[in-house]
Image: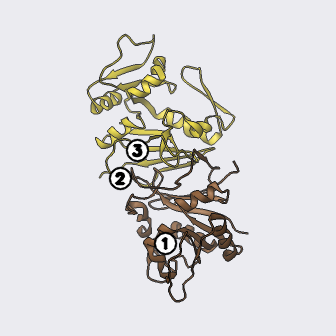
Chain colours: A brown, B yellow
Amino acid sequence: MGKVISSASTSLDGFVAGPDDEVGPLFDWYEAGDRPWTSAGGDMTFHLTQADHDYWSGWVARLGALVVGRHLFDITDGWKGTHPLGVPVVVLTHSPPEGWGYPGGTVEFVTGGIHDAVARAKQVAGDADVGVAAGEIASQCLVAGLLDEVSVDLVPCFLGVGRPYFTAVAGQVVLGDPTTVVEGERLTHLVYPVQPG
Amino acid sequence: MGKVISSASTSLDGFVAGPDDEVGPLFDWYEAGDRPWTSAGGDMTFHLTQADHDYWSGWVARLGALVVGRHLFDITDGWKGTHPLGVPVVVLTHSPPEGWGYPGGTVEFVTGGIHDAVARAKQVAGDADVGVAAGEIASQCLVAGLLDEVSVDLVPCFLGVGRPYFTAVAGQVVLGDPTTVVEGERLTHLVYPVQPG
């Protein structure tokens, strides 16, 4: 069975976006090289360095499903049914949007809570990993003991204010030492195991 | 001439201490190995891994002076005149404490502002580097264009609340890619160049 992994481009002060969801320098690495990487829908192409392309392709290849929250779904319009990473998406929400949908889309809704959402994503992913969005969903997974790894794509910037990687986690979170350290261009890829408390 | 470098053990959410100056897991690496490192005064010994000992010894060897703020001076009682790293300390303060001093101490006070404090520290350090404390002093140096490098000893934890690495810096701070990445035990040593704005 795959792992459950949170992942986000993150500033040195731990923000995954600005207060109004602006990404500022957090996504500069998407255009920091000359190796193209094209999204599943074909409508978005990054240009990465070789090291970043290798890392990113490996991450995507191991991914079997994603769990996201309603906020991310809303600001992306559910990626019009097809996530850029080409994997099914489980949206955790109290009230699924009525009549929303796109032909061939692989976005579904779960209302039962974080355990149900992750269970469904694991079912869809099979032996592959489940990615969970940083922020509210990653926090709920962490608190519920569902999170195996915390992936931090560390961007050399401080934002000062913004949306934290973990929200609503009471007290400190201590992780294991990184199992992966890859130096990219405009970021450092770090993967931390969540150790049992 | 040496560089001016800020340095601190830092959480993944960018805090260098908790709200009441407690360090929590930030200093766990001081006792994560079996190679002893003893402070200048001889009254404090860390036990580091070989990698951390090499990194730490190199940092200390290049250091010629430190600039700290009044808060750090107060909570340490000025290290009783002898900083653990064995280098002279310049304290930036509006009003130096009257009658404070220890025999053989190498702590002095500068009241003229951050430019004067760094100039004095550079004079004392000669060709060696000047270390500046994270927080208010590092922020003042950054804003004044006096900072060459930002050293982040990145500890695998989130604190949620605490004292930020940079305080009172308006807007975002974008650094260069790390020139140093060293994997230690209970932290990753990262050094970022400050690029001209």
Disc 2 from disc 3: Cα separation = 16 Å
Q: Nearer the viewer, mark 2 or mark 3?
A: 2
Q: Position of residue A168 (x, y in %)?
A: 53, 52
Of the residues shown, which amino acid type is indicated by label 1? Phe
| Label 1 crowd bin: few (<14), some (14–19), many (20+), radius 10 Å | some
Report which residue position mark 3 lands on.
Answer: B149
| Label 3 crowd bin: few (<14), some (14–19), many (20+), radius 10 Å | many
Disc 3 from disc 1: Cα separation = 39 Å
Q: Is residue B53 visible?
A: no
Outermost residue to the right: A1
> Residue at horizontal 45%, vertical 13%?
B104
Report which residue position mark 2 lands on.
Answer: B172
Of the residues shown, which amino acid type is indicated by label 3? Glu
Q: Position of residue B29 (x, y in %)?
A: 61, 38
Q: Nearer the viewer, mark 1 or mark 2?
A: 1
For disc 3, the chain is B
Q: Quadrant of the N terminus of chain A?
A: bottom right
Front position in the image: B158 or B117: B158
Residue at mark 1 shares a chain with residue at mark 2: no
Q: Secondary structure at mark 3?
A: strand
| Quadrant assignment, res A43 | bottom left
For disc 1, the chain is A
Residue B133 lies left or right of residue A120; in this view the side is left
Report which residue position mark 1 lands on.
Answer: A73
For disc 2, the chain is B
> Residue at horizontal 48%, vertical 17%?
B80
